[in-house]
Amino acid sequence: MVSAALHSPLELDPPHDPQLAALAANDAQLETAEKTAGNADISRAEVKKDTGVVKPSPAVISTPPGRWRRHAEAFAGQVLPPLLGLALLVGLWSLVSSTTGKSIPTPAETWDQALQVFSDPFYRNGPNDQGVGWNVLSSLQRVALGFGLAALVGIPLGFVIGRFSFLSRMFNPLISLLRPVSPLAWLPIGLLVFKGANPAAIWTIFICSIWPMVINTAVGVQRVPQDYMNVARVLNLSEWKIATTILFPAVLPYMLTGVRLAVGTAWLVIVAAEMLTGGVGIGFWVWDEWNNLNVKNIIIAIFVIGIVGLVLEWALVKLASAFTFEEVKT
């Protein structure tokens, strides 16, 4: 007779399950990592047991600076330096005004006078009594005529001098001789030849504006790569084709630089020429206000001349940038 011994299930050894063991080990590792991270006071990662995805703590992510900070830095880098320079000018102006016994008007007094001048800049009370707007327009008209004639003569002449070495050797001594002559030295010649103040002023602008355009255009032609000219020779191109399809695009940056320099020189010369010739113009307006001992209007005219010259320079820089691949700097 065989007797069977009955045992309770609690007394049996639990079977070995690999999955349960892995889960237990994972729980233990998680608990250890959390304790260690808490003791060391460092940012820890949150571990999801079900997916195993690690999500970094928000403390680890570095937030970029806000938009207000970037705008403030851009303002400080672009707007603040000019404002500081203007403040320095006003401060020095006030200091000079206080040390000269008010013979030089203060910035505040000049500003009040400027408001009156520009309240009606285009009035007419006679041929010699006109607003500052008409004087500026008259000066710009003379500059446009003299500069336009100089461009019509100087740019083609520069192309020819740069293209042919014989003409370059012929004209270089003449240019080197006449270019350093002061523009006002040509004014009496203009008065003698043209028998009038207005044509003499235009002549003076012409003769001082032509040299930058001739020199820069000729230098640009001479710096055209020889490979371009070899291709033109192989293709048997005419001189007109060479000038329009090869030289003009390559010389355009040099030519625009000469134009920019010529306009700046012309605007400088017209003020001095109008002081000597009279008539209507910003230079004559300055001289007339000096005869009236109106120093406030003289200072206003100085700022007007500077602003108009700045606008001309900016417009030509934009024009040069539109036709060239390189950035044009002032």
Image (cartoon, grey):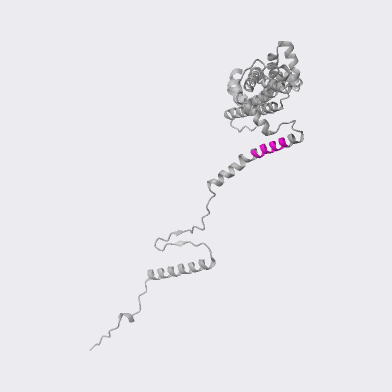
- Image: 43 above or below 208: below
Say left or right for 188 vs 125.
right
Q: Residue at x 71, y 36 (%)?
A: 94
Residue at (62% x, 42% y) in the render: 77
Query: Is most of the magenta stretch helix, strand or loop?
Result: helix
Q: Quadrant of residue 198?
A: top right
Q: Position of residue 180 (x, y in %)?
A: 76, 23
Image quarter of the C terminus: top right
Is residue 222 among what the camera can see? no
Instruction: In this rendered view, identify the residue nearer to me: 12 or 295.
Output: 295
Up the image or down, 63 lies above or below 92; here it is below
Q: Quadrant of residue 207?
A: top right
Residue 99 appearing in the image: yes
Front-most of 64 and 94?
Answer: 94
- Looking at the image, the residue that sits furthest to the left is 1
Which residue appears at 72% of the width and 27% of the height? 295
Q: Nearer the viewer, residue 168 or 328?
A: 328
| Magenta region, residue range | 83-94
